[in-house]
Image (cartoon, rainbow, N blue to C red):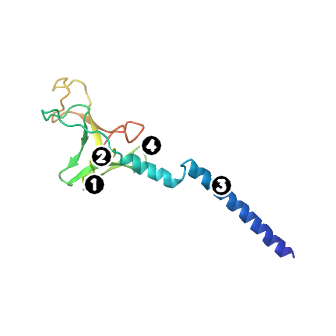
């Protein structure tokens, strides 16, 4: 008799635990807080189409242009991978290369900025070979401005 009472209690406890887990799951699902939703949101955000810059007829690269960066040696395109964090640094991610043309999406477009407003080349907006530049991720992919560094 005692063992049958324990079995009934186990069933009731199991049913209650299952009910609360299901309720917790449904709450997270309604708030889009499940891990699946977080991953899907990251993928959607990183593959969203974004604007990029074309030369204004003179074929010069200018300060603030949004560009797709290629690597001739690797025969690929540089893309940001926000799912791979760099170890030992608080907010750092690992860039990677893809061999297929990604097109203008948020993970593949980078912004070129001059480091100094005025240097030996002058103070115009044209970027020349040898000038110091910063390569930053476009503002569509992350809430903070992230720079490429080596």
Say left or right for 52 vs 86. Answer: left
Using a 10 Å C-alpha cutoff, classify the residue at mark 4 as few (fewer than 14 neighbours), some (14 to 19) or many (20 or more): few
Q: Position of residue 55 (x, y in %)?
A: 17, 35
Q: Which mark is residue 140?
A: none
Residue toward you, 36 or 96 = 36
Measured in 3D between alpha carbons, the distance from the residue under mark 3 to the one under mark 4, in whole angstroms, is 35 Å
Is residue 69 at least partly visible in the picture?
yes
Q: Position of residue 120 (x, y in %)?
A: 16, 25
Query: Which is nearer the N-term, disc 2 or disc 3?
Result: 3
Q: Are marks 4 and 1 in contact (CB under 8 Å)?
A: no
Secondary structure beneath label 4:
loop
Q: Are marks 3 and 1 in contact (CB under 8 Å)?
A: no
Is residue 85 at least partly visible in the picture?
no
Using a 10 Å C-alpha cutoff, classify the residue at mark 2 as few (fewer than 14 neighbours), some (14 to 19) or many (20 or more): many
Q: Residue at x 45, y 49 (%)?
A: 41
Q: How many marks?
A: 4
Using a 10 Å C-alpha cutoff, classify the residue at mark 3 as few (fewer than 14 neighbours), some (14 to 19) or many (20 or more): few
Q: Which mark is residue 108?
A: 2
Q: Residue under circle 3?
A: 23
Q: Residue at x 43, y 47 (%)?
A: 88
Measured in 3D between alpha carbons, the distance from the residue under mark 2 to the one under mark 3, in whole angstroms, is 40 Å
Query: Which is nearer the N-term, disc 1 or disc 2?
Result: 1
Measured in 3D between alpha carbons, the distance from the residue under mark 1 to the one under mark 2, in whole angstroms, is 10 Å
Measured in 3D between alpha carbons, the distance from the residue under mark 4 to the one under mark 1, in whole angstroms, is 25 Å
Name the quadrant of the N terminus: bottom right
Judged by depth in the image, the label closer to the viewer, 3 or 4, is: 3
Secondary structure beneath label 2:
loop
Q: Are marks 1 and 2 in contact (CB under 8 Å)?
A: yes
Q: Are marks 3 and 4 in contact (CB under 8 Å)?
A: no
Measured in 3D between alpha carbons, the distance from the residue under mark 3 to the one under mark 1, in whole angstroms, is 42 Å
Q: Residue under circle 4?
A: 90
């Amino acid at each position: 008799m005692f063992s049958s009472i324990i079995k009934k209690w186990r069933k009731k406890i199991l049913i209650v635990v299952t009910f609360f887990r299901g309720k917790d799951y449904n709450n997270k699902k309604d708030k889009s807080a499940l891990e699946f939703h977080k991953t899907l949101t990251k993928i959607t955000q990183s593959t969203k189409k974004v604007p990029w810059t074309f030369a204004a007829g003179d074929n010069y690269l200018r300060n603030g242009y949004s560009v797709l960066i290629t690597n001739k040696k690797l025969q690929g395109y540089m893309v940001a991978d926000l799912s791979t964090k760099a170890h030992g640094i608080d907010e750092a991610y690992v860039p990677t290369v893809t061999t297929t043309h990604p097109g203008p999406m948020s993970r593949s477009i980078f912004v070129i900025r001059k480091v100094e407003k005025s240097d030996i080349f002058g103070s115009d907006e044209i970027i020349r070979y040898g000038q110091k530049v910063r390569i930053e991720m476009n503002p569509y992919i992350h809430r903070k401005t992230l720079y490429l560094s080596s």
